[in-house]
Image (cartoon, rainbow, N blue to C red):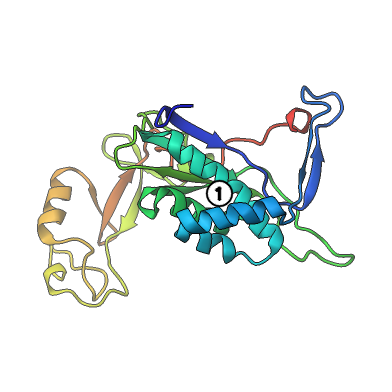
Amino acid sequence: MNSATVDLIYLDPPFNSNANYAAPIGSKAAGAAFKDTWTLSDLDTEWVNLIESKHPVLYRVITAAMTDSDKSYLVYMATRLLEMKRLLKPTGSIYLHCDPTMSHYLKLVMDAVFGKNMYRNEIVWERLKGAGKRTQHAPISYGPATDSILFYASKNAVFNIGDDLVPLSDEYRKSFKYRDSKGVYARRSPFNAPGQGARPNQCYKYKGFYPPHPSGWNVTLPTLIRMDEDGELDFANDRVYRKQRLPSGKHANSLWTDINAAPKSERV
């Protein structure tokens, strides 16, 4: 493939889980299998030598790995990511799906290959409700329920997140307990700034109200006046509150909790 021709890359590589996998009988991928176990081979060593001469920062990341198995896995990933960097357009983006087994190493590898300045997000995906690994008597870990997706892109990348809003959870909606003068469900947030020390420019009286904490309000007087004019303040219980109206939805963020894992019958 020609260089700088790909707009978007998503990869779901092996995770170095030290296990072997086969598609379940009856699935569309039946018969497919792969080994996710790694040993350092002569070929890996040759790749390490080549990386040392051409990509010294990447070489230091690989050689910092704790075991030969980890080094072998990182060589496998590094050689492919270097090729993906060649293919990716300056306006392109890359998303790498991994789990906590090697995510810390893979982030360093991505930093070394694409540049630390291209890191945008680590997306945490709640893929399932796990039950921690157990001994005979009691659990020895919290239930694994998340994977990571490392997102890298240049400052010139095309990023079409759009204006679509993610639906709000019922629990979040219930936190908006009263209706304001316009009939919109809202909730009140305090305006104090505790624990930040006294700030003279934010210790003032407003419409007969003093800040509820010695450190003052958490905004300056001009900002408070503007918010009042915009209908963002609520005066109740001898205090001033910030009025938060119930939004119609929220923009997507780096925590994904509403995308279920594929059914086992569809997994490889």
View extreme (left): residue: 222
Residue 115 locus on image (x, y percent): 39, 51
Of residue 43 and residue 228, the one placed in the foreground of this image is 43
Report the number of numbered marks.
1
Vertical arrangement, residue 120 with respect to residue 238, above or below: above
- Residue beneath the point at 73% across and 51% down: 17
Of residue 101 and residue 188, the one placed in the foreground of this image is 101
Relative horizontal placement of residue 97, taking residue 249 as reference (left or right): right
For badge 1, the amino acid type reads Ala
Q: Secondary structure at mark 1?
A: helix
Vertical arrangement, residue 87 with respect to residue 192, above or below: above
Relative horizontal placement of residue 220, taking residue 74 as reference (left or right): left
Residue 53 locus on image (x, y percent): 48, 57
Relative horizontal placement of residue 141, taking residue 211 as reference (left or right): right
Are there few (<14), some (14-19), or many (20+) residues within 10 Å of tag 1? many
Residue 224 locus on image (x, y percent): 15, 55
Of residue 104 and residue 128, the one placed in the foreground of this image is 104
**Residue 255 visible in the shown view:** no
Quarter of the image with the C terminus is: top right
**Residue 17 visible in the shown view:** yes
Vertical arrangement, residue 158 with respect to residue 218, above or below: above
Residue bearing the label numbered 1: 78
